[in-house]
Amino acid sequence: MSCKYAKTTDEYHGWECSVTGGACMFLFPNSKACAEKYGEGPDAETEPEEFVDNVTKYECLDCGKQFILGDAASEKLPHGFPVCPYCGKSSIEWRTKAESSDIEDMGCMEIWTSSKGKILHDAGGGEDGE
C-alpha cells in the first residue's frame, strides 16, 4: 500500500500527489486504489480496455432521423441528453435496445469502445470499419 507519485509534505494531510498537484486522495497513499477509483497513478491502465458496447437506437421526433448510441457513452452524458446529432433537438425516443450479440439487427455490425467511453471504431461502415 504505497504510491510512487505520493510525496511527503507539510501541507494537506502529509501527502501530495505529483499527478494532480494537490493532496493525495487517500490518508495512506495507495496506487492500486487510486487506479481503480480515479484511473490515475502508476497502476492505472496504460491502454484503454476495449469492448463491444451494447447500444440503443433512437429516433428524433423533429427531423425523423435515427441514430445509435453506445450504453457506455450514454451513461456519461449530462442531464437532458442525448440529443439528436443531426438537428440538435432533444425530442427523441428510443426505438430498440440491443446487446452486442444482436446489434446487426440495428444496421450496425459492432461499436468498439474503451473503458473511458470513447468510441474507438465501428465496424458498420464508419471511418475505421470500411
Image (cartoon, rainbow, N blue to C red):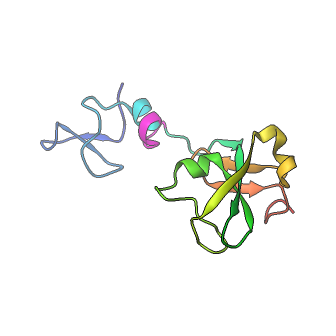
Q: Which residue is drawn at 36% across and 49% down?
A: 19
Residue 7 drawn above or below residue 81? above
Highlighted magenta segment, given as a residue range: 36-43
58, 20: nearer the viewer: 58
On the rendered structure, is 79 left or right of 98? left
34, 5: nearer the viewer: 34
Magenta segment: does it hold 41?
yes
Residue 73 location in percent, x, y? 60, 51
Q: Residue at x 24, y 44 (%)?
A: 23
On the rendered structure, is 47 left or right of 125? left
Residue 106 drawn above or below residue 41? below
On the rendered structure, is 126 left or right of 43? right
Residue, far left = 10
Residue 9 location in percent, x, y? 17, 42
On the rendered structure, is 5 left or right of 75? left
58, 78: nearer the viewer: 58
Quadrant including the N terminus:
top left
Which corner quadrant of the image does residue 62 belong to?
A: bottom right
Residue 60 drawn above or below residue 26? below
Residue 122 location in percent, x, y? 77, 56
Quadrant including the C terminus:
bottom right
Q: Residue at x 45, y 37 (%)?
A: 35
